[in-house]
Image: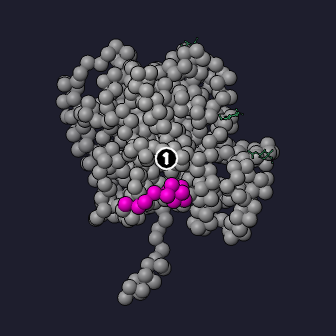
């Protein structure tokens, strides 16, 4: 019996692409959204009536209303610049949303996107997990009912300088960007932001992010942890933990994972796979030219599909900056004797980014947003900066030692992975977890949402790894309900649902 069922299952062909939503389902969604709208607007008015005063600086940063924003529910939001280095004139741009209900009782959650060079405003906030997402073609904004400010006060930061609206008055800064530089500026941002919003000083603080923020997040957590040791010299920041999604963590394991994922998901031929295994030694950070060439063959197979979400339809908008950046990266790897690797944005979807680019370049939007006040932006606002990606100094190969250290320090650490991502695939992440050598507390098992397996998780002694079934690189975009369940569970220190 059992073998028969298994045999049948093996031959079942599941549709790979989700069918368009039925009209009935849409009605349900609209009805649900209306209910939520009603619920949130009543909550909001309760909150406003009871609101504590906001100081003058906060009022100056308050965003009353963005062009094209839905008139309800009300969204309590702020945006502006925080100076992180006076001498060189560096300022980072933020967008902050108070929690939808009872903000004074909710933790503070920082979100960072990666790239390096990609904007947390354009990606995290406006395309993924923020309450206001840019609608199709950048015409306006839509309320996101799975926004992560349900359980947290949610802070998006455009980092480092040169990304999005963030800038420096000393252009040579842009040639010096590396992980250490980024962490230092982000730390100064936090300290100065908490000066501007002192009501959040005593809130529990968590850091989150995806992709190349797999470097930024643990590194910033580490810096906060270190500076917290000297309470006299530094502001104490009530850091409780961090959570990262499809994070670049360790070059060796992530590269090995990328190759094995491409082969095991039928993207590349046996020949290409064998060639890489023959000529590449990922233990050495310096790839040989044979290895670069063999790896180029893998990336080429991905050009016709979306490496960030391998079963999703590819965005086929006309020639986009993403495709261009990708092609340049490949060319560069041939021409410029790239001794290390093919550069490619980690987490970059052409369609979504083009909507965001349309919206955030509108003068009335920038005005309402307190951005680019005296036109200091050198060009257009971009969701990812090609030049930052190219000039970035990739000097850190692994952040695993930081994990070991901060696990010992007792921080809450979660690591999640959309299992349809080919760029920072779940296989490499599993190698990373294995390398940490932690004892298992609860073995690999499914977690559930809406009576379906939403993914799997494993609880180690000191951290938790979660997968999201069928999500790509941008989990909150691909699986918004699962993403919200995940962040709420993390923030509340609970456990994912282990039964239907
Ligand atoms: C950068 O320069 C502009 C123009 O002089 C100035 O208004 C701005 O305050 C400077 N930014 C910082 C962070 O010092
Ligand atoms: C990388 O390879 C180049 C050329 O083979 C070599 O000159 C350089 O020293 C290597 N760098 C490292 C960090 O191994
Ligand atoms: C890259 O960063 C490392 C680590 O901070 C530093 O030692 C190195 O000099 C930097 N390289 C360049 C080209 O700036």
385 sits left or right of 468 in the view: right
What residue is drawn where x is 79% and y is 48%? 334
Is residue 328 rendered to the left or right of residue 61?
A: right
Is-magenta flag for residue 440? yes
What percent of the width, then of the height, locates residue 110?
42, 35
In this rendering, the answer to whether 274 lies above or below 110 is below
Residue 467 visible to an observer of this rendering: no
**Residue range highlighted in magenta:** 431-441
Magenta span includes 219 = no
Above/below status of 265 relative to 345: below
Q: Report how many numbered discs are placed on residues in the image.
A: 1
Whole-percent x and y of residue 460?
41, 57
Q: Please provide percent x and percent y for residue 432.
A: 53, 55
Percent position of residue 130, x then y: 40, 38
**Which coloring applies here?**
one colour
State which quarter of the image contains the C terminus.
bottom left
**Residue at image location 47% in from the left, 54% down from the top:** 417
Circle 1: element type: helix
Residue drawn at (67%, 42%) of the image: 325
In the image, 37 versus 221, the foreground residue is 221
Q: Can you see residue 496?
A: yes
Left or right of 478 on screen, residue 33: left
Q: Quadrant of the N terminus?
A: bottom left
* Residue underneath mark 1: 403
In the picture, residue 115 is in which quadrant? top right
174 or 5, which is in the foreground? 174
């Amino acid at each position: 019996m059992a073998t028969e069922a298994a045999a049948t299952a093996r031959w079942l062909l599941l549709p790979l692409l989700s069918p368009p939503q039925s009209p009935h389902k849409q009605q349900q969604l609209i009805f649900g959204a209306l209910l939520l709208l009603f619920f949130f607007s009543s909550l909001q008015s309760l909150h406003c009536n009871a609101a504590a005063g906001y100081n003058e600086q906060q009022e100056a940063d308050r965003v009353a209303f963005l062009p094209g924003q839905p008139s309800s529910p009300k969204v309590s939001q702020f945006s502006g610049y925080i100076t992180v280095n006076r001498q060189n004139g560096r300022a980072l741009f933020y967008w902050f949303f108070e929690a939808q209900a009872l903000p004074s009782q909710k933790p503070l959650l920082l979100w960072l996107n990666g790239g390096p060079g990609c904007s947390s405003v354009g990606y995290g906030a406006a395309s993924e997990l923020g309450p206001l997402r840019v609608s199709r073609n950048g015409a306006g904004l839509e309320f996101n009912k799975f926004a992560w400010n349900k359980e947290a006060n949610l802070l998006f930061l455009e980092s480092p300088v040169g990304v999005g609206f963030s800038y420096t008055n000393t252009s040579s800064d842009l040639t010096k960007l590396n992980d250490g530089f980024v962490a230092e500026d982000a730390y100064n941002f936090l300290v100065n932001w908490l000066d501007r919003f002192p009501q959040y000083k005593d809130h529990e603080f968590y850091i989150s992010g995806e992709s190349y923020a797999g470097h930024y997040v643990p590194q910033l957590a580490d810096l906060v942890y270190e500076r917290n040791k000297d309470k006299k010299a530094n502001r104490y920041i009530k850091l409780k933990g961090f959570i990262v999604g499809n994070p670049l963590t360790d070059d060796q394991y992530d590269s090995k994972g990328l190759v094995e994922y491409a082969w095991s998901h039928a993207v590349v031929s046996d020949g290409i796979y064998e060639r890489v295994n023959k000529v590449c030694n990922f233990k050495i950070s310096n790839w040989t030219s044979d290895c670069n060439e063999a790896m180029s063959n893998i990336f080429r197979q991905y050009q016709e599909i979306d490496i960030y979400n391998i079963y999703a339809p590819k965005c086929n908008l006309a020639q986009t900056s993403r495709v261009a950046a990708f092609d340049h990266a490949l060319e560069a790897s041939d021409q410029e004797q790239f001794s290390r690797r093919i550069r490619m944005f980690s987490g970059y979807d052409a369609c979504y980014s083009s909507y965001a680019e349309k919206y955030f370049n509108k003068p009335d939007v920038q005005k309402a947003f307190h951005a680019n006040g005296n036109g200091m932006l050198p060009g257009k606002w971009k969701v990812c900066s090609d030049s930052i990606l190219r000039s970035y100094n990739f000097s850190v190969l692994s952040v695993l030692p930081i994990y070991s250290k901060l696990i010992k320090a007792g921080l809450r650490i979660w690591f999640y992975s959309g299992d349809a991502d080919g760029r920072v695939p779940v296989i490499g992440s599993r190698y990373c977890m294995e390398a940490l050598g932690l004892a298992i507390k609860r073995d690999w098992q499914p977690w559930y949402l809406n009576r379906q397996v939403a993914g799997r998780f494993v609880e180690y002694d000191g951290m938790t790894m979660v997968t999201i079934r069928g999500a790509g690189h941008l989990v909150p975009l691909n699986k918004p309900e699962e993403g919200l369940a995940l962040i709420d569970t993390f923030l509340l220190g609970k456990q994912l649902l282990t039964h239907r």
